[in-house]
Image (cartoon, rainbow, N blue to C red):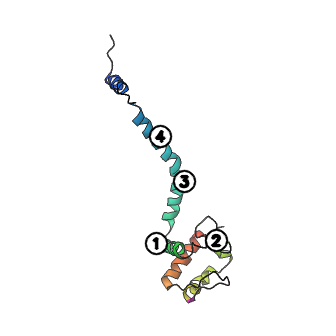
Amino acid sequence: MLRPSAAAADWRICAASGANPCRGRHAVYRLLLGLALVAPSLSTGFAAEFKLSPLERHGRALAERLCARCHAVGRSGSSPHSGAPAFRGLDRRVDLDGFVRRLQTGLTSGHPDMPTFRFSRDDARALTAYLRSIQGP
């Protein structure tokens, strides 16, 4: 005579109570599959984040706080304001070597919506370092 295993006995008890003994295991498998599918896209964003130096991260924080209302300040996306250039292409419009000085003395633009900004030396260096880090090909 065959004797049922302990696992089979547990399954019969769970089945009799209306519970599915595989349900928890399937939920774990679904979670792991979901993480496996999402992780590569998340890791590229995290990798870009960790590649930034502390100076560049400070510059990005300044750009997000002061400029993102009008400009696209990251490596992708479009500017919320139609006349505002994306920061990832600024090197084609301005000389980034002299940009630190312009930020310190008061950055002005011919665009009427663009406010005048005056940065400290450290903030100007940080913003310029961040701008250099995101310039496209």
Q: Amino acid at mark 2?
A: Ala
Q: Nearer the viewer, residue 80 or 124?
A: 80
Q: Nearer the viewer, residue 37 or 10?
A: 10
To which residue does mark 2 refer?
A: 86
**Left/right of residue 57 with respect to residue 132 in the rendered view:** left
x and y, in percent, of residue 93 in the image: 68, 77
Which is closer to the viewer, label 4 or label 3? Answer: 4
Q: CA distance from mark 2 to mark 3?
A: 23 Å
To which residue does mark 1 refer?
A: 54
Q: Amino acid at mark 4?
A: Arg
Which is closer to the viewer, label 3 or label 1? Answer: 3
x and y, in percent, of residue 111 in the image: 67, 82
Q: Nearer the N terminus, badge 2 or badge 3?
A: 3
**Which mark identifies residue 41?**
3
Q: Amino acid at mark 1?
A: Pro
- Residues drawn in magenta: 105-112
x and y, in percent, of residue 80 in the image: 62, 69
Image quarter of residue 88 = bottom right
Q: Are marks 3 and 1 in contact (CB under 8 Å)?
A: no
Q: CA distance from mark 3 to mark 1?
A: 23 Å
Q: Is residue 104 above or below residue 14?
A: below
To which residue does mark 4 refer?
A: 30
Q: CA distance from mark 1 to mark 4?
A: 37 Å
Question: Would you call the spot at circle 2 few (<14 residues within 10 Å), some (14-19), or many (20 or more)?
Answer: many
Which is closer to the viewer, label 2 or label 1? Answer: 2
